[in-house]
Image: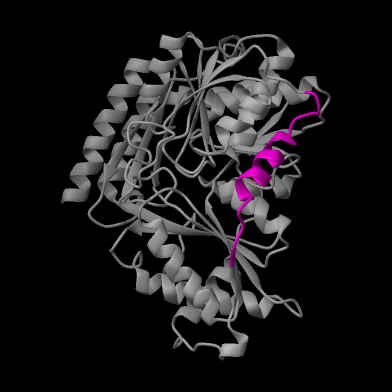
Amino acid sequence: MGKQYFGTDGIRGEVGVAPITPDFMLKLGWAAGKVFASKAGKHRPLVVIGKDTRVSGYMFESALEAGLVAAGVDVRLLGPMPTPAVSVMTQTLNATAGIVISASHNPFQDNGIKFFAHDGGKLADEIEHEIEAMIQRPLETSGSSALGKVARINDAAGRYIEYCKSTVPRGFSLDGIKLVVDCANGATYHVAPHVFEELGATVITIGAEPNGFNINAGVGSTDMSALTAQVRQTQADLGVAFDGDGDRVLFVDHQGSEIDGDELLYIMAKSRQQRGCRDQGVVGTLMSNLGLELGLNALGLEFFRAKVGDRYVKEAMLERGWALGGESSGHLICTDVSNTGDGIVSALQVLRAVVESGDSLASLCSEMEKMPQTMINVRMAERIDVTANAQVQAAVAEVEEALGESGRVLLRLSGTEPLVRVMVEGSNAQKVRELCSGLATKVEQALAD
């Protein structure tokens, strides 16, 4: 059964446009609180709330807080914190659930809500269905003696910094490494630089002056130009870019070349193999580069493509008992060090590979040959299944015939925006660009008809 509000990564949209409004957030907080309270058993229900640096976060934090308190749920406020930090704090505080107010890599005009279960993982589908059903019921405030209580966790950032450092071996050092850290003017601005500095790196920080409006604006993993320029200008060893809520990470090597999530997955997988980890395989997605699959196969590792979305990557990892998975976007999961995708923790795993190998990031990446891949986002007036359109199906068939067995085509609806992502991959870069451009044009035309 489909859901009315929850998408692949919580609830997200433009601020002020339903359901991203304060009245809905009040009702959502109450509905979620009632559902969580029903699961808490004899324990008093407790929910932790964190947020990124969007100006609208304060408004939604207050609304959610009021709804949860009205439902008889205690609340702990973390303030601006990365999404994975909320997962960690949910577990640390033995909370019933965690809530993140964030629209991740989207611009400041958007916002959204993500939930974590008691174990720090994503909510099960059935719980989301229960929350949506509860939203339809009238809001009833608990009696005064049963109202929830609210407190602020003032040392949340320090706790998370220590957690991140605990994911690398004791004695691990970044001494001698000059690192540019781009915090996207987002939730990692007051934690990521400290993690790397305390491990010994010389850190140059950019994108760490959030004002409520500049999250992801010309900085971070969605726009690597500022990081690339800074790495070259300062002659740094490498650069690290996070997205607005800190669950994704991408790198830049010392030459200023961008390193995506597929390459980082390969580096992590090979490093783990060299350390003696007995990984059988790695989970990627439908968008993962064919070069990653071929590179992992050459290491003797299996590769499985899950649907796009960290929820589906994690599910596939658990089904197979594999510890490593991720997406090209830099959302990486390593379950033996973290329960969810964590940009800072993933960055440390990559840096560990660099330090232990003694090679540069550029050298480690050169061992995997990426296939030319082009993706074009086509905006839609409304979300429809374009793959069912006869014109689109014919256009896709033409491109697949032109590629032969040396490439592939993928059309995928964005889980968070009214976009269809048109991707073409093959052995010839120019041919791939031309085919993708032509296919995107035909998709636009089909949508306009």
Can residue 133 be seen here? The reply is yes
Taking the image as shown, residue 421 lies to the left or right of residue 252, namely: left
Front one among 395 and 335: 335
Residue at horizontal 42%, vertical 67%? 5
- For the point 48% across and 75% down, the residue is 66
Outermost residue toward the left in this view: 449
Q: From what the image shows, is residue 15 above or below residue 313? A: below
Tell me: residue 203, above or below residue 343.
Answer: above
Position of residue 330 measured from the top left corner of the image (x, y, whole percent):
52, 34
Q: Position of residue 326 (x, y in %)?
A: 59, 37
* The stretch drawn in magenta includes residue 55: no
Depth check: 423 or 329 in front?
329
Outermost residue toward the front in this view = 154
Residue located 56% across and 30% down the image: 193
Instruction: In the rendered view, tell whether residue 183 sits above or below residue 148.
Output: above
Q: Nearer the viewer, residue 408 or 158?
A: 158
In the figure, is residue 365 to the left or right of 206? right
The extreme bottom residue here reads 143
In the picture, measured across the screen, residue 169 lies left or right of residue 445, that is: right
Residue 407 drawn at (x, y percent): 45, 26
In reply to whether residue 157 is colored magenta, the answer given is: yes
Q: Which region of the structure is painted magenta? A: 151-171
**Left or right: where does residue 272 sit relative to residue 408?**
right
The answer, for residue 428, to whether it is visible in the render is no
Count of numbered circles in the view: 0
Image color mode:
one colour
Name the spot of residue 149 as percent of width and height, x first. Answer: 60, 75
Q: Quadrant of residue 4?
A: bottom left
Q: Residue at x 49, y 55 (%)?
A: 8
